[in-house]
């Protein structure tokens, strides 16, 4: 993790406007060669330019322990606060994010590399989930059930769970935390957040705002950060029994490690892992709509979304003409600095991602894939830029590389004859996050969404819109190697609470269930 020597003595204006220059974790005067191992500092760079932005001090095991202990103590008090009052806390946090929407979204783009519109849109997601959580704070309801015993009643209630450990990836350094933290807060839980070391500045700014609001309302230590390496902080957190729930977003490899360790201590996991998402296009589809949706799904965030469109499965009768159109569309995508309003695709996060992109393209071509456009890095811009890429599979649809998720703007194109064949092809990968079909037929749409489970096997299934982008009202997550977790809307709040069944005897007799007599 050694960085190229450089010096940063004039902080970026966004760091100043968001108060990061005065934060004890942030180091403005950096030399660019600090490493976590030697100095306890990492250097955060701008992927659009390769220039350093600031240093960030890392937690060690002692500071991790202090943070966790504070979270445990804060939970004991916070769970006593009425849920609607906790909702008021979340409402005020949402207001503060609205006040800095453009600045915080721009910082996200500066640090992560997604275009400014997407950066601002991501912060808006956190605002939206805060609004959702405020209403939820008055609806954390259980149910009543009839008892088989006379003069007895039964009910369920949902209770605060405890400190929640939230581990997030670099590509959504604000919203994924928001999905978890806002719901956890109204449920009565505290949150300790371990963000990616590639995007810690956004995490610091985001958490600082929530922490300030909570402290002003008398709720100290509800929202906390631990920023550290996987071996020092990550492994310690997932093995820590004081966290009844670990919510982790990242690669399938990471999820397997988190899941096995947490299961070993009989804790709860919420895993949102990789996706190898496909779009199916039927001959009767609105092809203009399909074209626009597919391009955004494939090149948005430079292919660094878990919901990115990675496979295009198109009917053989329209494949040649549609691929020609999408190649032309790719050539119009303006690539450059993420904060430039005219740019539609920013950089990859770092040089390692560029190399993985190049290796994936090379391997796919070796396997018989035909490179239709892109496939190379863009030199001369100073950052980690690549060209969005389309690779067409051979006529037999055999392209093993397409089964691997490469976090980059590569889309593989396959053809099919029947809808059943297309659905089988879509479901053939290990992951099961997002899926989409474009069709003018209600019959085809219903077969894709078949309530028998014979259609899409993904957690998200869309008709006439792409794989990328999701509203906060629905539960977000997927099946198979995607981990099975659900975040955000619907009844995803239940994972942050524990269920308790209560039976009350309001009579004077001992009556046992199942008619058992004990006299």
Image (tube, rainbow, N blue to C red):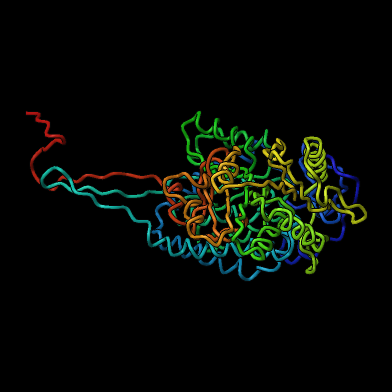
Question: Which residue is most to the bottom?
Answer: 99
Horizontal arrangement in the rendering, residue 286 relative to residue 48 (left or right) = left
Q: Is residue 397 visible?
A: yes
Tell me if residue 43 comes above or below residue 490 in the rendering: above
Which residue lies at the image location 79% right of the left edge and 36% below the top edge? 363
Horizontal arrangement in the rendering, residue 98 relative to residue 198 (left or right) = left
Tell me if residue 429 comes above or below residue 340 in the rendering: above
Query: Which quarter of the figure has residue 500?
Result: top left
Image label count: 0
Where residue 501 appears, as percent x and y from the top left, is 29, 44
Tell me if residue 138 comes above or below residue 67 in the rendering: below
Which residue lies at the image location 87% right of the left edge and 55% below the top edge? 8
Where residue 419 appears, as percent x and y from the top left, is 55, 48
Q: Is residue 164 visible?
A: no
Question: Which residue is most to the right?
Answer: 380
Q: Nearer the viewer, residue 435 or 163?
A: 435
Quarter of the image where the N terminus is located: top right
Horizontal arrangement in the rendering, residue 307 relative to residue 327 (left or right) = left
Quarter of the image where the C terminus is located: top left
Which residue lies at the image location 75% right of the left edge and 50% below the top edge? 409
């Amino acid at each position: 993790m050694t960085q190229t020597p450089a010096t940063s003595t004039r902080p970026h204006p966004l760091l100043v406007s968001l108060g990061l220059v005065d934060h004890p974790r942030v180091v403005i005067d950096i030399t660019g060669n600090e490493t976590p191992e030697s100095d306890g500092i990492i250097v955060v760079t701008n992927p659009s330019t390769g220039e350093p932005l600031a240093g960030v001090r890392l937690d060690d095991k002692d500071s991790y322990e202090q943070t966790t202990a504070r979270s445990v103590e804060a939970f004991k008090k916070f769970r006593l606060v009425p849920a609607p009052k906790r909702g008021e806390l979340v409402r005020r946090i949402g207001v503060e994010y609205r006040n800095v929407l453009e600045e915080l979204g721009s910082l996200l783009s500066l640090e992560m590399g997604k275009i400014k519109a997407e950066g601002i849109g991501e912060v808006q997601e956190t605002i939206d989930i805060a609004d959702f959580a405020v209403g939820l704070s008055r609806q954390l309801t259980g149910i009543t059930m009839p008892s088989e015993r006379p003069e007895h009643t039964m009910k369920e209630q949902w209770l605060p769970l405890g400190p929640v450990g939230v581990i997030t990836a670099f590509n959504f350094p604000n919203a994924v935390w928001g999905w978890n933290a806002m719901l956890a807060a109204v449920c009565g839980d505290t949150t300790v957040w371990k963000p990616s070391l590639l995007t810690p500045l956004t995490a610091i700014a985001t958490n600082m705002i929530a922490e300030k609001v909570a402290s002003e309302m008398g709720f100290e230590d509800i929202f906390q950060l631990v920023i550290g390496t996987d071996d020092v902080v990550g492994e310690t957190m997932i093995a820590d029994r004081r966290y009844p729930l670990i919510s982790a977003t990242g690669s399938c490899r990471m999820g397997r490690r988190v899941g096995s360790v947490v299961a070993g201590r009989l804790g709860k996991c919420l895993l949102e892992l990789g996706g190898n998402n496909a779009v199916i296009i039927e001959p009767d589809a609105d092809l203009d709509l399909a074209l626009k949706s597919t391009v955004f799904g494939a090149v948005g965030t430079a292919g660094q979304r878990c919901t990115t469109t990675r496979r295009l499965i198109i009917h053989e009768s329209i494949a040649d003409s549609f691929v020609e159109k999408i190649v032309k569309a790719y050539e119009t995508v303006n690539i450059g600095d993420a904060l430039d309003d005219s740019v539609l695709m920013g950089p990859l996060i770092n040089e390692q991602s560029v190399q993985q992109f190049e290796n994936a393209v090379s391997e796919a071509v070796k396997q018989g894939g035909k490179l239709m456009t892109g496939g190379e890095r863009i030199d001369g811009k100073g950052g980690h830029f690549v060209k969005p890429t389309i690779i067409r599979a051979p006529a037999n649809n055999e392209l093993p590389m397409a089964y691997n998720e490469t976090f980059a703007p590569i889309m593989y194109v396959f053809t099919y004859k029947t809808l059943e064949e297309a659905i089988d092809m879509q479901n053939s990968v290990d992951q099961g996050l997002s899926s989409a079909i474009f069709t003018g037929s209600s019959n085809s749409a219903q077969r894709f969404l078949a309530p028998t489970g014979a259609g899409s096997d993904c957690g998200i299934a869309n008709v006439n819109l792409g794989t990328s982008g999701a509203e906060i009202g629905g539960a977000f997550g997927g099946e198979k190697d995607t981990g099975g977790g659900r975040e955000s809307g619907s009844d995803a709040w239940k994972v942050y609470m524990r269920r308790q069944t209560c039976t009350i005897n309001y009579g004077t007799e001992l009556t046992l269930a199942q008619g058992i007599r004990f006299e």
